[in-house]
Image (tube, rainbow, N blue to C red):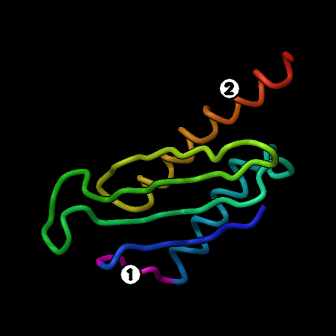
């Protein structure tokens, strides 16, 4: 599973953030790693330089072999919280989609 990062113009994509996000995604989505060809992480700050509630956004897009991409989003006060929320949403979506495929 290849992980690709994209950040908005107001986001400082530090090496520490990328490392922790990569570790979290590999841990949480490991059972789907053979089906995911690429996972794109999009981080953005919707309020720019202003402070606001739930203004950090994480969108995860999973490219599955032979299927359409799956995208989920989460908003939170920090990037770490947004990534955790989006990861939870992605895990749920993948379980549903792959579960349906196994029933056919």
Quadrant for residue 21, please give it.
Answer: bottom right
Residue corresponding to mark 1: 12
- In-image side of 83 versus 37 (left or right): left
The residue lying at 66 percent from left, 59 percent from top is: 39
Residue corresponding to mark 2: 96
Q: Main secondary structure of the magenta part?
A: loop
Residue lying at the far left of the rendered structure? 50
Residue 95 is tagged as none
- In-image side of 98 versus 69 (left or right): right
Q: Which residues are magenta?
A: 10-14
Residue 44, above or below 68: below
Residue 9, x across and y down, in percent: 32, 79
Residue 82, above or below 79: above
- Looking at the rendering, in which quadrant would you find the N terminus? bottom right
The residue lying at 54 percent from left, 63 percent from top is: 41
Asked which secondary structure carries label 2, the reply is: helix
- Looking at the rendering, in which quadrant would you find the C terminus? top right
Quadrant for residue 70, please give it.
Answer: top right
Residue 52, x across and y down, in percent: 16, 58
- In-image side of 41 versus 74 (left or right): right
Closer to the chain start, of discs 2 and 1, is 1
CA gap between label 2 and label 1 equals 34 Å
């Amino acid at each position: 599973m290849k992980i690709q990062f994209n950040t908005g113009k107001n986001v400082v994509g530090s090496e520490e953030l990328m490392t922790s996000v990569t570790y979290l995604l590999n841990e949480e989505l490991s059972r789907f790693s053979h089906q995911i060809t690429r996972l794109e992480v999009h981080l953005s700050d919707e309020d720019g330089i202003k402070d606001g509630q739930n203004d950090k956004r994480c969108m995860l897009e999973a490219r599955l072999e032979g299927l359409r991409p799956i995208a989920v989003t989460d908003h939170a006060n920090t990037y770490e919280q947004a990534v955790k929320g989006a990861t939870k949403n992605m895990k749920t979506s993948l379980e549903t989609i792959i579960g349906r495929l196994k029933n056919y």
